[in-house]
Image (cartoon, rainbow, N blue to C red):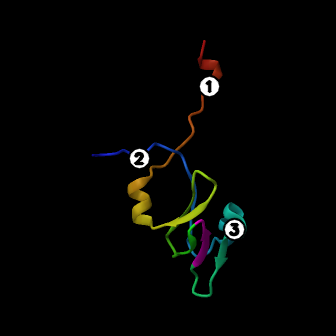
């Protein structure tokens, strides 16, 4: 059998080694900045390590996970909300 992943829109941020305040604003106290410039992310399954270049994503239940860049790029596309111009609907 084959299955297709349901299309969902997620929020995420990429850890670049310098944006801990931005990451912390996104996920709150779920991230710890380590001396080796990695992040420890508290997830539903325990702590996971995020390396520079990894994305931190928010799951459908509000939980957070690190995701390797290569996997993220194969799984997700950029998303821009469609903006409807009400003046063009006449």
Q: Which mark is nearer the camera, 1 or 3?
A: 3
SS at circle 2: loop
The earlier-in-sequence mark between 1 and 2 is 2
Q: Which residue is mark 1?
A: 85
| 74 magenta-colored | no
Q: Residues within 10 Å of mark 1 (few under 14, many from 20)?
A: few
Pick the front one: 68 or 43: 43
Q: CA distance from mark 3 to mark 2?
A: 29 Å
Residue at (34% x, 45% y) in the render? 3
Give the image location of residue 12, x and y in percent.
57, 57
Marker count (numbered) = 3
Secondary structure of the residue carrying tag 3 is helix
CA–CA distance between discs 1 and 2?
Answer: 31 Å
Of residues 43 and 58, the one nearer the viewer is 43
Task: Give the residue at x 72% y 70%.
Answer: 29
- Give percent across and percent down for residue 62: 64, 55
Question: Which residue matches tag 2?
Answer: 5
Dot 1 or dot 3, earlier in sequence: 3
Can you say whether 50 is above or below 77 in the image?
A: below
Q: Is residue 28 above or below residue 78?
A: below
Q: Mark 3 or mark 2: which comes first in sequence? A: 2
In this rendering, the label closer to the viewer, 1 or 2: 2
Q: Is residue 43 magenta?
A: yes
Residue 2 x, y percent position in the rendering: 29, 46
Quarter of the image with the C terminus is: top right
The secondary structure type at the circle numbered 1 is loop
Magenta span covers which residues? 39-44
Disc 3 crowd, CA 10 A, few/some/many (<14, 14-19, 20+) = some
Judging by the rendered image, the residue that carries numbered circle 3 is: 24
């Amino acid at each position: 059998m084959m299955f297709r992943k349901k299309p969902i829109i997620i929020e995420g941020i990429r850890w670049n080694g310098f944006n801990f305040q931005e990451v912390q604003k996104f996920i709150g106290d779920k991230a710890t900045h380590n001396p080796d410039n990695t992040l420890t992310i508290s997830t539903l399954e325990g702590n996971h390590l995020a390396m520079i270049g990894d994305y931190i994503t928010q799951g459908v239940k509000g939980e957070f996970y690190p995701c390797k860049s290569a996997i993220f790029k194969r799984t997700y596309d950029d998303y821009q909300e469609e903006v409807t111009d009400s003046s063009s609907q006449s």
